[in-house]
């Protein structure tokens, strides 16, 4: 978890313009990509994906989505 947070900080430092992705990421299931509009409410800490039934802690799901996004950017840049 600490590794993920460190990665997130580095990534933010590198490209602040991608902050929009952060907000979208909170709603996307990291497993199947389903967009769960209900998760937009910050009170939702844990949720189950209606499509693939994965259960997500909000912060972990966001971190994983950001990590994936960061890796995509890294891959396309090299
Ligand atoms: Zn899902």
Image: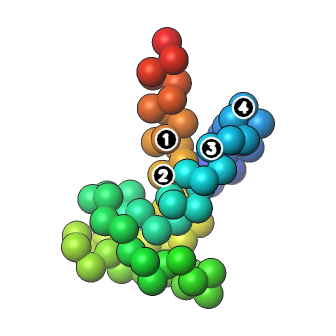
Task: Please give left or right for residue 50 compared with residue 77 in the image.
Answer: left
Question: What secondary structure is found at the residue carrying circle 4?
Answer: helix
Q: Residue at x 36, y 68 (%)?
A: 35
Q: Furthest-top residue in view?
A: 78
Q: Quadrant of ligand 1?
A: bottom left
Q: How is the image coloured?
A: rainbow
Identify the residue under disc 1: 69
Cα gap from disc 3 to disc 4, whole angstroms: 9 Å
Question: What secondary structure is found at the residue carrying circle 1?
Answer: helix
Proximity of marks 1 and 2: CB atoms separated by less than 8 Å: yes
Task: Please give left or right for residue 15 compared with residue 58 in the image.
Answer: right
Give the vertical position of 50 relative to 25 (above or below). below
Identify the residue under disc 4: 14
Say whether residue 34 is visible: yes
Characterize the local packing of mark 3: few (<14), some (14-19) or many (20 or more) Cα atoms within 10 angstroms: some
Question: What secondary structure is found at the residue carrying circle 2?
Answer: helix
Among numbered discs 2 and 3, the one appearing first in the sequence: 3
Q: Residue at x 49, y 78 (%)?
A: 39
Identify the residue under disc 3: 18
Q: Residue at x 55, y 51 (%)?
A: 21
């Amino acid at each position: 978890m600490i590794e993920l947070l460190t990665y997130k900080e580095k990534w933010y430092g590198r490209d602040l313009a991608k902050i929009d992705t952060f907000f979208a990421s909170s709603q996307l299931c990291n497993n199947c990509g389903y967009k769960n509009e209900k998760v937009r409410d910050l009170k939702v800490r844990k949720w189950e994906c209606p499509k693939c039934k994965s259960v997500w802690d909000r912060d972990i799901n966001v971190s994983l989505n950001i990590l994936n996004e960061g890796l995509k950017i890294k891959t396309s840049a090299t």
